[in-house]
Amino acid sequence: MKAAAFNYARAASVSDALELLQAHGERAKVLAGGQSLMPAMNLRLISPELVVDISELAELRGIAVSGDVLRIGALTRHVDLARSPEIFRHAALLGEAVTHVAHPAIRNRGTLGGSLAQGDPASELPACMLALRATIVVRGRAGERRIEAEDFFTGIYQTALGAEELLIAVELPLASKGSVHFFQEFARRHGDYAITGLAAQAVVETGSFADLRLAFFAVGDRPLLAKAAAKLTGVAVTEAVLADACSTLSDELDPHDDQQATASMRRHLANVLLKRCVAALMDHPDFAPERPA
Ligand code: FAD
């Protein structure tokens, strides 16, 4: 199938793009890497009257430390995240997670901003934003808004982004001492969308987690920052503590049935991931420094 006829405009600047979006509202769609937009148009799931191509806007690209945050431009491609020394240093979770997104050809074109704006609950990068305490920077004709990642994803393919706004960048706090991460997903093949996944970021100190953020994905209509993390924070993690955290997690998950897995299978897999995550993070030398190498 081919897309329905549409008009095309290549934006010359961010303000040019915003003018076009304001003039056309819901009838326009932004084109970044095109890896989600074009398949959806070709399947005629959406048929915008105007496609606003922002892919040439250099001002939306790049990864840089600015003060106490790591700022990543919306047009930064998946492949750039995987290769960046700044990501490796300050947001290693993101660098690892992005290698699970699709395949090289798609990672060469797909962008961070596109993945977040798409709001797919089975996507890896939105969950990383929750785990990493990201702030999403969006801009409209009236100015900029800064939205906490937890408030950005509002439902299946739904976000807090308005039709006349552009996602400009993402800001992440720099990694602090003792920062560790965990990423795993269950998928039919490497590169497929996850059946269930977990992106976790923690700060460890001797014998406990000073901070723990567990962001599950493909377990509901949006990525979920699990309250179960509170059960594991600031305490000695015994088997009983872990069992209590697993039970809290099961209660707070509201997974769906689909052709890939039942809700109960997803709940089970999320618990498996939680146990693997805790075991892996507790194995970190900063968690148990007295252990012989
Ligand atoms: P586009 O396709 O250009 O845009 C996606 C949506 O976001 C559109 O609605 C567009 O209007 C909007 N948009 C884009 N940029 C902005 C912006 N700056 N401001 C406002 N709105 C914007 N993704 C995964 O997470 N995990 C996977 O395993 C995975 N597997 C895939 C497998 C295949 C075969 C394919 C084709 C895609 C897969 N994807 C997967 C999707 C891929 O990661 C996309 O690149 C990504 O979801 C969208 O990025 P994009 O730059 O291509 O955005």
Image (cartoon, rainbow, N blue to C red):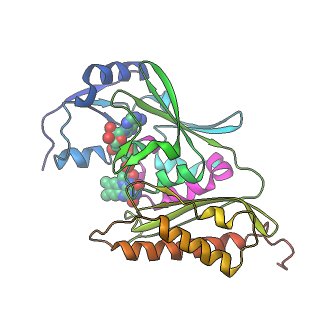
For the view shown, which residue lies furthest in the right direction?
Answer: 290
Q: Is residue 231 left or right of residue 197?
A: right
- In the picture, residue 193 is in which quadrant? bottom left
Q: Residue at x 66, y 80 (%)?
A: 240
Q: What span is colored magenta in the figure?
A: 86-113
Q: Residue at x 32, y 21 (%)?
A: 22
Mark count = 0
x and y, in percent, of residue 124 in the image:
46, 57
Q: Residue at x 42, y 56 (%)?
A: 123
Is 117 situated above or below 179? above
Q: Residue at x 63, y 51 (%)?
A: 91
- Can residue 251 be found in the magenta stretch? no
Depth check, front residue: 56 or 31:
31
- Can residue 105 be found in the magenta stretch? yes
Q: Is residue 32 in sight in this rendering?
A: no
Q: Is residue 103 left or right of residue 169?
A: left
Is 284 situated above or below 8? below
- In the picture, residue 248 is in which quadrant? bottom right
x and y, in percent, of residue 169 in the image:
52, 35
